[in-house]
Amino acid sequence: MFHDLKPELKETLAQIRTFVADEIIPLEPLLLQQYFSALLPQLEEKRAQVKSLGLWAPHLPQDLGGLGLSLYEFGHISEVLAHSPLGHFVFNCQAPDIGNSEILLQHGTVNQKQRFLNPLLSGDIRSCFAMTEPEHAGSNPVYLSTTAVKDGNDYIINGHKWFATSADGAAFAIVMAITNPAEEKLHKRASQILVPLDTPGYRLVRNIPIMGEAGEGYFSHGEVRFENCRVPQSNLLGKEGAGFELAQKRLGPGRIHHCMRWIGISERALEMLCQRAATRELSPGNLLGTRQTIQNWIAESRAQIDASRLLVLQAADKIDRQGASAARVDISVIKFYVAGVLQQVLDRALQTFGGLGMTDDTVLSFYFRHERAARIYDGPDEVHKTVVARSLLKKYMKL
Ligand SMILES: Cc1cc2nc3c(=O)[nH]c(=O)nc-3n(C[C@H](O)[C@H](O)[C@H](O)COP(=O)(O)OP(=O)(O)OC[C@H]3O[C@@H](n4cnc5c(N)ncnc54)[C@H](O)[C@@H]3O)c2cc1C
């Protein structure tokens, strides 16, 4: 089923690979030593270079300055960008902005696009997505307490959210709030509403520390409160009550983006593992790479990463051809499988580096801290496995 990539895309991929290696990876030691905002001036310089190369926001349609790629094609780019934790940001296709821009593109009104989408696409602002609430199980997000109540031409929003990735410094949030509490079907009660974060009543309570990192700027996860936040009803995205329908549309391609990013990280970790194994002497002339355990890890990682890539590209191709709902089970398969492969490959690489792997002298510890969450966000493993198992079991039993 796989079609070959167009020759010009292959050239672009090679160009991006070189850019990541030569221009972005050298910035990583700074990322490991200091806060994201201290790095911003250098990152802005790199972003300007990417714009001048015509590679900015490659996920976008051509008329908006992107490369006009299918999801299948963009997946390849996402993998290459993930060779550095800074890659997607420098090319302006980082989560959650990429998902928010896709939703605005497909469902935003002309005014919403002008006010929120355009500055997002130009990289002048960042955004966040606020759905999960501390008081409710995020795995079943139809249970929400955040409300948006109509008052004149406005909505008044009240609620408590957390894990709003990149909330610190974001210009707006897409907030999932209950607008139709009387609706019988739980998944039709909520709507997505655009909330500028300078709206009175909005508060960033804290950046939630994750695995020993305080979190800041783009690399933050915010606990936030909306207390009588008043926004015009024209900030509603799509139709009232369609919040989860939009979320599903966002999450299908979003999971392809995540999975291809995890594959890129796994490739980087495997490359580092091999380099270390090939140079670390256990005793003079006796290299770590001669040990069978290490060789098994290399072989297993190679097979798992390649299998992951095939699975993800198959799902991306299905979304391109038939839409996200047709690929629902395929998306669940890749979400838990690739997240698991990533953990295993990272762990093997870190183990191969020994004590050095635990330090912040290499990017492995950064990836290890940041990517454990891959098995939790956008649906924990267990939820996705249930989706897959139920789709198979329904042929055999009533569920
Ligand atoms: C780094 C990070 C970034 C995030 N970014 C965002 C963001 O930008 N915006 C946002 O709104 N949210 C975000 N989240 C929140 C994330 O989507 C939720 O954490 C996730 O949906 C799980 O919800 P929960 O934490 O409430 O866990 P719970 O729902 O309390 O679940 C806890 C555990 O129970 C188990 N479990 C749950 N359901 C089942 C089941 N059906 N069967 C068996 N076991 C089950 C799983 O092991 C799960 O890990 C982020 C989370 C993290 C960690």
Image: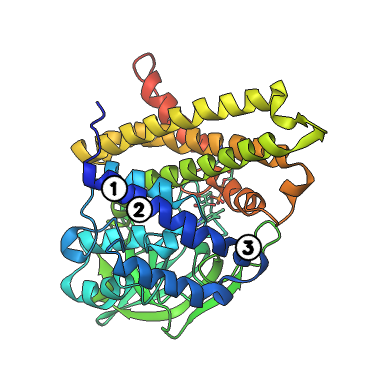
Q: Few, some or many C-alpha atoms within 10 Å of disc 2 (few <14, some 14-19, many ≥20)?
A: few
Residue 15 image label? 2
Say which residue label 1 marks: 11
For marks 2 and 3, the one nearer the N-term is 2
- Mark 1 and 3 residues: CB-CB less than 8 Å, in contact? no
In the rendered image, the residue lying farthest to the bottom is 200
Residue 29 image label? 3
From the Cβ of disc 3, is ligand 1 less than 8 Å away?
A: no
Which of labels 2 and 3 is toward the front? 2
Give x and y (percent) for residue 60.
Answer: 25, 58
Residue 269 appears in the figure = yes
SS at circle 2: helix
SS at circle 3: helix
Give x and y (percent) for residue 363.
Answer: 62, 53
**CA separation in Å, label 2 and label 3:** 23 Å
For marks 1 and 3, the one nearer the N-term is 1
Q: Few, some or many C-alpha atoms within 10 Å of disc 3 (few <14, some 14-19, many ≥20)?
A: few
